[in-house]
Amino acid sequence: MIVVLKNSVSPEEEQAVVEEIKKLGYQPHVMHGVARTVIGAIGDEHSHYDLDVLNAWPQVESVTPIQQRHKLVSREAHPEDSTVNAGGVIVGGKKIQVMAGPCSVESEEQLLKTAHAVKAAGATMLRGGAYKPRTSPYEFQGLGEDGLKLLAKAREETGLPIVTELLSQDHAELVAEYADMLQIGTRNAQNFQLLIAAAETGKPVLLKRGMSMRIMEWLLAGEYVLANQNPNLLFCERGLRTFEDYTRNTLDLSAVAVVKNESHCPVVVDPSQGCGKAALVRAMCKGAVAMGADALLIEVHPDPAHAISDAAQQIDLEGFGELMQELKP
């Protein structure tokens, strides 16, 4: 790290800072300039605590880290792109994977009809919510384990690996028993104990961006997964809450390019949540692909008008088939 001292620092005060740097486990190299003294502290910047300690010294003007705080998800630690294997589907390779299915698992008929249709259209994974995070306690909360069993049946019939949301640490082992990939939703993006529990299952973790989350916060949330011995992390851009209310959220496609540049982990885009309007999903999918997304997460329903949740943003089976044709290279 680089420590810049104030210009009023005495030699004794400078030496005190040098001793503190040594105490923290770094090797200090002092450089005296015309107006400022700069100390290069060489060592493993393993703790943000060290920066806080040095910044608290009255003689210190600034402390600048050299290593990335998100060192495990960063390209500094892993320059090459990573891939994630979810039930035999490789995300992060040359092929753009499509995870499609209903927002909520509502019934066996609804799920199986959707699963067979998206498989026929070219989807490579099945998405569906068994446990649903809802703003209101009076809204449909999902079928729970019964929904997981239906997802498992759909996988058995179609061969599509499943991705479903994990809401609670208490359900981690149960959901992991059925799912090929665990989704951490926007409301839980900084629920660090849940991230640890998801990581400890060993299953791939799809981390959605928090609705008001800065990119660095998102990367650091992902760091929890890799820091807990699970290398199978995917970032999912799903839109931000902004001043714009024409769309449900504002899909930040620039984040795809930024995260692809900063991290080796695959990046997924959810255009359904990202805009909240079925009519815009096709355009958002194409934009995501153009920005370098590794996969798409798309909500599909056999009868969107009568969907129990998120009816406005789910596309019908015919529309999904047309979209898949348009996405062909």
Image (cartoon, rainbow, N blue to C red):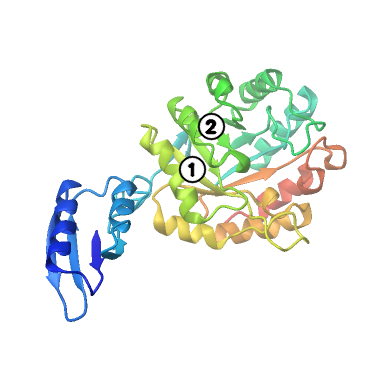
Tag 1 secondary structure: strand
Q: Evaluate whether residue 76 shows in this view.
A: no
Image coordinates of residue 292 in percent, x first then y, are 50, 58
Q: Which numbered circle lies on residue 234?
A: 1
Q: Which numbered circle lies on residue 173?
A: none
Q: How many marks?
A: 2
Left or right: where does residue 162 sit relative to residue 89? Answer: right
Tag 2 secondary structure: strand
Q: Residue at x 71, y 55 (%)?
A: 275
Left or right: where does residue 314 sit relative to residue 83? Answer: right
Q: In this rendered view, identify the residue nearer to me: 6 or 47.
A: 6
Q: Label 2, on which residue?
A: 181
User: Quarter of the image containing the N terminus?
Assistant: bottom left
Amino acid on which the number 1 mark rests in the picture = Leu
Image marks 1 and 2: residues in contact by CB distance under 8 Å: yes
Alpha-carbon span between mark 1 and mark 2:
10 Å
Q: Residue furthest bottom?
A: 34
Image coordinates of residue 326 in percent, x first then y, are 66, 56
Q: In this rendered view, identify the residue nearer to me: 28 or 274.
A: 28
Image coordinates of residue 178 in percent, x first then y, are 57, 21
Q: Evaluate whether residue 249 shows in this view.
A: yes
N-term-proximal mark, 1 vs 2: 2
